[in-house]
Image (cartoon, grey):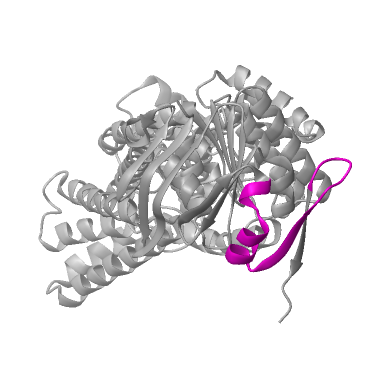
């Protein structure tokens, strides 16, 4: 099979898996429904079962998909730009800075204002993106930019901790905490409507950066001598990653490891090509989060497992495995 | 008009002068070897010509135009570059790596050219293999193929034979000769003086950022020059296949 047809098969396969996972996520849930009630859900729009399927489970599942896709895309863009298998929006501080923005909005009592927390999170991501763009203009090596991102992440985390520390209201603190754990519980179609256009915009930026990401495989100087405008590429890629990661954090809080893991799961299938990796990485990120959310809410615990906790539990060992394999097989 | 030219080029890196009023030109159809001890400025000459380091004064010209005035694409179309010790970030197939040398061709055309270039460097059978699964020598051939895919008027190669086995070294030098014959201006930095003497039309000797010789090999690599710049004993020997350079360490 040629590279292109293998890629098509991969994306089509992922698309079908996503459709299947979304269907399962809508059909199954804590509230058991009888067969007749499923019928009702399709025929009577205002019935209880219709409400459960289309206003509770469906937007939640779609939200999980869009957030996962955003993280998968951001991870693929950043790994391609920095030529490093360990880059993702979490490592580079985009997620932590977005979370800081949201935490600030919550303790300032803006949680009741519709859209305020989301906008604060996006502003945080934009700030991180701007700082990374600024740093990338001065730091020549991708490793140096990653170290800068790690420092940014730690600092944003410290400021968020400071907010906890100084917050007079335990209720606000609990709210921030719950938000930081990451979840798509109780998300509605309006959340989907907020996050989807942003992820599409990020996708457009990523698509514009995509040919440059492939040229970058041989390093910045070689790419530049082949005619790549490096400055433009860095800006496009970092904007794409900041918008995607910011949108994800704005709607679902901090969900780690999806951005890191998704590109690795499909890299071999696209023969390592960072530009052909973008779409399947987004799709696999979406698939992971739909399945993870389904598993999290079906796990019989008193308190529902938070999605961010669940992905971290699976993701952290995976992170170790990736580092282990990368060190053995390839460039570390 | 030279395909590659430096005029009074002065460059500093971290406060150290790496190019000190360097004037040079490389014409279409000739192979010019850049030689000099470590830190003499060989890579800096190549990088200045490509616009990768900025000059404090003087000018670097590609095809008669100042490199700073050219768009990234125009630079890419005027000069192909084979960097030193090229690192490849991801395990892509050799043919995809070689095709990166022609980013402005359509995908299918670039792949076709890449396969031709891989065949020319004796790596045709490796085309669909991942570069991480190759030996260092095989990977070097793939990177050379990438530089050959681009049919720019000039080719700049920074230490292209370092770390290669003898057969691959000679293959690289033969390919550079072929390129020169087809009209490309070839500038290549080399550590191996005997190979430089044998394969270049002209040798430029650099010492601490300055050009100390720029002439035909036998003149540029004279016994005095070898002693002064490289601190080694050298002599030219007549052989059936032309003059050869014989080198020895100086005793004491």
At 59% from the left and 65% from the top, the residue drawn is B228
Queried whether the magenta region covers residue B233, the answer comes back as yes
In this picture, is A248 found above or below B209?
Answer: above
Mark yes or no: residue A180 visible: yes
Q: Position of residue A112 (x, y in %)?
A: 12, 51
Q: Is residue B234 left or right of residue A230?
A: right
Q: Which residues are magenta?
A: B218-243
Q: Is residue A165 left or right of residue A141?
A: left
The single residue placed furthest to the bottom in the displayed view is: B252
At 54% from the left and 43% from the top, the residue drawn is A217
Q: Position of residue B200 (x, y in %)?
A: 67, 40
Queried whether the magenta region covers residue A290, the answer comes back as no
How many numbered markers are drawn? 0
At 41% from the left and 45% from the top, the residue drawn is B52
Q: Position of residue A53 (x, y in %)?
A: 40, 34
Q: Position of residue B100 (x, y in %)?
A: 57, 32
Residue placed most toward the observer, B80 or B225:
B225
The single residue placed furthest to the right in the displayed view is: B240
Q: Is residue A257 left or right of residue A245?
A: right
Residue placed most toward the observer, B87 or B54:
B54
In the rendered view of the protein, which quadrant contains the C terminus of chain A? bottom right
In the rendered view of the protein, which quadrant contains the N terminus of chain A? top right
């Amino acid at each position: 099979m040629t590279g292109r047809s293998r890629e098509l098969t991969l994306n089509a396969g992922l698309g079908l898996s996503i459709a299947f996972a979304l269907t399962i996520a809508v059909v199954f849930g804590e509230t058991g429904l009888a067969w007749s009630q499923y019928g009702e859900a399709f025929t009577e729009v205002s019935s209880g079962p219709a409400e459960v399927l289309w206003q509770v489970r469906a937007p939640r599942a779609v939200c999980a998909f869009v957030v996962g896709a955003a993280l998968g895309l951001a991870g693929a863009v950043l790994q391609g730009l920095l030529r490093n298998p360990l880059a993702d929006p979490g490592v580079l501080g985009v997620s932590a800075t977005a979370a800081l923005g949201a935490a600030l909005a919550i303790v300032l009592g803006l949680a009741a204002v519709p859209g305020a927390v989301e906008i604060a999170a996006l502003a945080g991501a934009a700030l991180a993106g701007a700082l990374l763009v600024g740093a990338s203009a001065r730091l020549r090596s991708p490793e140096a930019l990653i170290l800068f991102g790690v420092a940014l992440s730690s600092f944003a985390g410290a400021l968020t901790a400071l907010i906890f520390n100084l917050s007079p209201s335990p209720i606000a603190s609990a709210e921030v905490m719950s938000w930081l754990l990451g979840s798509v519980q109780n998300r509605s179609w309006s959340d989907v409507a907020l996050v989807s256009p942003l992820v599409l915009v990020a996708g457009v930026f990523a698509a514009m950066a995509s040919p440059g990401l492939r040229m970058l495989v041989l390093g910045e100087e070689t790419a530049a001598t082949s005619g790549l405008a490096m400055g433009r590429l860095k800006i496009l890629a970092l904007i794409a990653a900041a918008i995607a990661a910011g949108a994800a954090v704005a709607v679902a809080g901090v969900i780690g490891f999806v951005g890191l893991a998704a590109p690795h799961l499909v890299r071999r299938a696209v023969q390592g090509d960072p530009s052909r990796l973008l779409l399947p990485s987004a799709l696999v990120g979406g698939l992971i989060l739909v399945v993870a959310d389904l598993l999290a809410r079906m796990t019989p615990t008193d308190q529902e497992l938070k999605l961010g906790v669940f992905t971290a539990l699976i993701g952290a060992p995976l992170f170790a495995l990736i580092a282990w394999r990368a060190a053995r097989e390839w460039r570390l | 008009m030279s395909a590659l030219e430096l005029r009074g080029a002065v460059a500093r890196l971290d406060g150290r002068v790496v190019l000190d009023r360097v004037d040079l030109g490389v014409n279409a159809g000739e192979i010019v070897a850049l030689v000099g001890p470590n830190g003499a400025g060989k890579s800096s000459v190549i990088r200045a010509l490509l616009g990768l380091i900025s000059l404090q004064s003087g000018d670097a010209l590609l095809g008669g135009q100042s490199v700073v005035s050219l768009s990234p694409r125009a630079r890419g179309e005027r000069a192909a570059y084979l960097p030193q010790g090229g690192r490849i970030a991801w395990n892509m197939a050799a043919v995809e790596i070689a095709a990166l040398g022609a980013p402005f061709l359509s995908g299918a055309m670039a792949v076709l050219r890449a396969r031709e270039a891989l065949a020319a460097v004796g790596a045709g059978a490796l085309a669909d293999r991942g570069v991480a699964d190759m030996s260092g020598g095989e990977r070097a051939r793939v990177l050379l193929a990438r530089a050959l895919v681009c049919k720019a008027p000039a080719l700049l190669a920074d230490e292209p034979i370092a770390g290669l086995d003898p057969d691959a070294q000679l293959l690289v030098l033969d390919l550079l000769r072929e390129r020169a014959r087809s009209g490309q201006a070839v500038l290549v930095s080399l550590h191996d003086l005997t190979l430089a003497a044998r394969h270049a039309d002209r040798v430029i000797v650099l010492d601490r950022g300055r050009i100390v010789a720029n002439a035909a090999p036998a003149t540029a690599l004279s016994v005095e020059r070898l002693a002064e710049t490289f601190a080694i004993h050298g002599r030219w020997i007549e052989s059936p296949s032309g003059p050869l350079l014989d080198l020895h360490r100086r005793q004491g």
